[in-house]
Image (spheres, grey):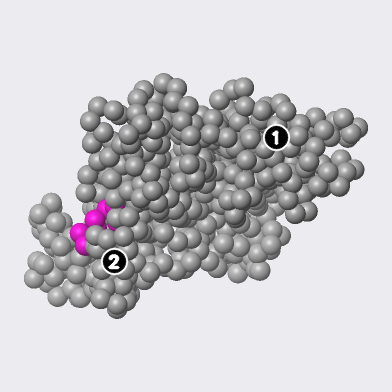
Amino acid sequence: MTDDLYDLDGLATSLAATLRELLTEAGVADADVPAVELALPARPEHGDLTTNAAMVSAKRAGRPPRELAQALGERWQAGPGAALCERASVAGPGFLNLFLNAAWYRGAVQRMRAAGTDFGRGALPLGERLKMNVEFVSVNPTGPLHVGHARYASYGDALCRIFTFVGHDVTREFYVNDYGTQMLRFGQSLAARYGERLGLDTPVPEEGYQGEYLLGLADDLIAAVGDRYRAAVAAAAPDVTALATDALAAIKEWGRDAILAQFRLTLERLRVPFDVWAQESSLYAGEVEHRSFAGEVGKTLADLDGEALLYDEGGAVWLKTTRYGDDKDRVLIRSSGDPTYFLSDIAYHRDKMDRGFAHMIDVWGADHHGYVPRMKAAFTALPPHDPDRLELIIGQLVNLLESGEAKRMSKRKGDIVTVDDLLDAIGVDAARFLLVGRSHDTTLELDIDLACEQSNKNPVYYVQYAHARICSILRNLEGVGEGSADEALPAVAVDGHERSLVRALARYADVLLAAADQRAPHRVHTYLGELAAEFHVFYRHCRVLSDDPDTTRFRAALCGATRDTLASGLALLGVSAPEAM
């Protein structure tokens, strides 16, 4: 017997092999069986694990489900399961219930302890691992990151951590929208504040950015360049929209870089790294031209022309997105000759395909919901016309509650709560944990008062406290310790509370696979709360430092496995695992 049987995946694989034997003996050609799924019974008297594998395969086997379940249980218990299964029974329409012995629980704990915080790593089969690009946050560099961006950042980063942990090859990407109307308005707004600080009458344009943060940015600009642009701004005053092109471009570029520098610092503080910062403006740079555009944009237009998907109408250039499910065709080049933001987005995704990503995920804000069909249509229009290669995830909003009242935010008006404000108020750990506490497609209410509370009501405190408590327990064993991770555990009895905790730990890899498959970091968040609760129950009923040294060793090892799994799960959410609180 291999130690693979001491985890749920190994048990499931072993049962599937036994079921395949039964199907082959029944004359079933190509006796591949669906993956065997193991679940925890709702009631402990129904065993340690249960599976509906016989019910799923009964028709192919030509046998009643209960009869096939009985045969599966007997065959498996007489073979691979002999050393770790006390008995198997059939329940209901054909569920097979397994009653595992203490040896399985001890072996499971030993396997977990040997893996340490790597328990569950690489759980994804080799054939399912992908080279992936995950693009998230990607906000216009026109102002500070606010709490909505903190949610998308925390979600995207946790998703990337989970993807990487289970086995995918992941590139994290931030797309800098530094081209187009919003950047023009930002440049004009900064120029107005710059002029204001230099004593000029330069009000911010009505459609510009009104936030007070631009005054600080203008002060930084003056510190960097002095009055270099004063004459140009004065010549345009009071209407900064008439500012000379070269001066506006210089001010806009300086402001973009300053905002991006702030983004990097804030995201670093939030523990959100990026591998690539891709700039929209770079998509227009290159030697090859098509329809007067160079770079990736020109290549994209050439590709679409090659597919006969572009046409001219009303002086504009249109893409036939209706051919791929959009409700109407879309303009790529305006009659003025200017590109639309849609053209940039298509070229950007073409660039990601050129970089060899098998799968691309974009995490977008709630305001992009209506943009999904046209983006999918445009992506499908690009060769090789593979819509499944691009996945668009829409996140929902954050309602920030303080003293029971919600705060409203608007970057344009300057009424925002920044990510740095949030981190100053509740800390990085609370922010990271709470921001992934619910599914990305539901609105999240983040209670500032609760996040600061040091009690079991605060979810992050509850989980971190469980980790810190285990660290304290192990420190206080006074030399008894957990023993070596490779050392066989003593053959002690394993009671119900210990078994329950081991089963909770054994679920970890399956939780991670589900979180990756469903794009759901909140499943890890939920699991950690459940695991912490399971540990607290175990600790109330099982004295770790017992009168029996062997029992102490086993329970210490179980504590160690719990500590490592809590630390691993917290790390996947970008949260620290303190050793003392």
Q: Which one is in front, 42 or 262?
A: 42
- Main secondary structure of the magenta stretch: helix
Q: CA distance from mark 1 to mark 2?
A: 46 Å
Going from N to C along the chain, the mark reached first, 1 or 2, is 1
Residue at coordinates 39% horizontally, 25% vertically from top-left?
Answer: 485
Q: Quadrant of residue 550?
A: top left
Image spot of residue 580 (x, y percent):
22, 44
Mark 2 sits on what residue? Answer: 450
Can residue 209 be seen in this snapshot? no
In magenta segment, residue 424 = yes
Q: Quadrant of residue 443?
A: bottom left
In magenta segment, residue 121 = no
Question: Taking 62 as reference, is 116 left or right?
Answer: left
Residue at coordinates 27% horizontally, 45% vertically from top-left?
Answer: 468
Question: Taking 233 as reference, is 330 left or right?
Answer: right
The quadrant of the image that shows the N terminus is top right
Instruction: Determine whether label 1 and label 2 are within 8 Å by CB.
Output: no
Residue at coordinates 61% horizontally, 62% vertically from top-left?
Answer: 373
Q: Which one is in front, 543 or 160?
A: 543
Image spot of residue 242 (x, y percent):
27, 69
Residue at coordinates 26% horizontally, 68% vertically from top-left?
Answer: 449
Q: Circle 2 sits in a helix, a strand or a loop, which is it?
A: helix
Q: Circle 1 sits in a helix, a strand or a loop, which is it?
A: helix
Residue extent of the magenta highlight? 422-431
Q: Amino acid at mark 2?
A: Leu
Can residue 192 be seen in this snapshot? yes
In the picture, the disc for residue 15 is 1
Image spot of residue 135 (x, y percent):
45, 49
Question: Taking 109 as reference, is 104 left or right?
Answer: right
The 10 Å Cα crowd at callout 2, few under 14, some 14 to 19, many 20 or more, is: some
Q: Amino acid at mark 1?
A: Leu
